[in-house]
Amino acid sequence: MKPSIVNSLIFVWYHPDDHEIAFEIAGNLKDQGVDIQFNPIGLQSGEFSFNSIEWWLSQSPIVIFLLSESALSAPILQDDIKKVLRADRKMLVPVILDDYAARNLPLLLKFSPKIDCRHPDYQKGSKLTREIQSKVSRYGENSIPSGFLLKRLFRWIIEHFRTYLIQRPLTFCWRITVENLIVSLTVTGLIQFLYQPPTRTNLDEINAVSFLWLVVILGPIVETIFLQGFPVFVARKVGFKYSGQILFSVIPFALLHFSRSIGTGIGAGVIGGFYSAFTYVHWRDDSLWTAFWVTALSHGLYNFALFAMLIGEF
């Protein structure tokens, strides 16, 4: 059975500036038989309502975030979104109220099904209720038929990478590095087993110290600047969204590595390029410096792990 908003406790998170539309939406949902609770952030009746928000965020299986310019300016928005995302099997439904929110949607919500409430029809009758029910149903265990393996895999991948969006920089860095290493080495090993491409010989002319300097230290810095930083800068200027920025970075990174071998092109170029691009694009919304150092450090740690495995080749 798919989850239903009827007989489910829903908490509506909103900014005090949006109280009129929040009350209107809540009233429409209650008319449809929904058990709904809501408190604005900040001051309410002369008292801070943070404690009540904490409680409802922890108790409500479904949380609706009403997003507007005022809401996006609230310092606690990111933390409250993270609390919901970290909770097991909670359903988060972002509702966009204005053009500013549509243009500046928090990265934490990029992978969440969203409702665009700017059209007045969504604030009347049961249309918004049906739309919320549709979004909520996608979180159910049976919302995707068992036969659709590709869809189930895609949903799992999306949910998996969304867990990275709530990590702090250093935790993000070591986790993404380990995963990148495991995935790329596994795929490269399969290619070696099935295809048996020619062995790289360019390590014969380099000593361990030079490899450490060029590949572990200098290389990640230069590649982060020119193969993540510059492509993402161009993609953002053109107006590409999250996935477009990642793709725009992966392509040159992969092409550079395919020039060495097929195994290197797929393992380091495509897979490694994706992880580096994902890292850079994610942290770029935080700051340019964070995007640079997290990406360069992750790349350097990845290459150092390869250096440790290849130490006998020098």
Image (cartoon, helix red, strand yellow):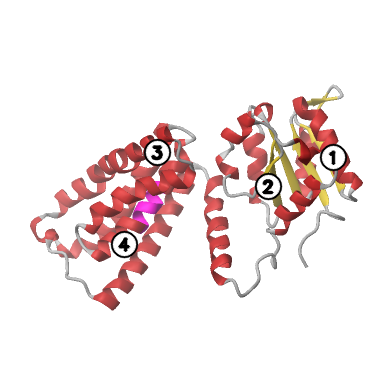
The CA distance from mark 3 to mark 4 is 23 Å
Q: Is residue 295 left or right of residue 52?
A: left
Q: Residues within 10 Å of mark 3 (few under 14, many from 20)?
A: some
Quadrant into which the N terminus falls: bottom right
For the point 77% across and 54% down, the residue is 133
Disc 4 residue crowd, few under 14, some 14–19, many 20+, Cα 10 Å = many
What residue did someone put label 1 on? 26
Query: Residue type at mark 1?
Result: Ala
> Callout 2: helix, strand or loop?
helix
Instruction: Measure the C-alpha gap from mark 1 to mark 2.
Output: 20 Å
The residue carrying mark 4 is 266
Task: Say what amino acid the circle numbered 4 marks.
Answer: Ile
Horizontal and vertical percent for residue 7?
87, 55
Image disc number at residue 235: 3
Cα–Cα gap, marks 1 and 3: 39 Å
Three-letter residue code for mark 3: Ala
Q: Which residues are magenta?
A: 271-277
What is the C-alpha distance between the residues marked 1 and 4? 50 Å
| Spatial separation of the CA atoms under disc 2 and disc 3 | 30 Å
Q: Is residue 99 magenta?
A: no
Q: Which mark is residue 84?
A: 2
The answer to whether residue 230 is visible is yes
Q: Earlier in the sequence, mark 2 or mark 3?
A: 2
Query: Which of the two labelled residues, at mark 1 and mark 2, occupies the earlier sequence position?
Result: 1
Q: Was residue 276 drawn as part of the magenta stretch in this picture?
A: yes
- Residue at left 52%, top 50%? 164
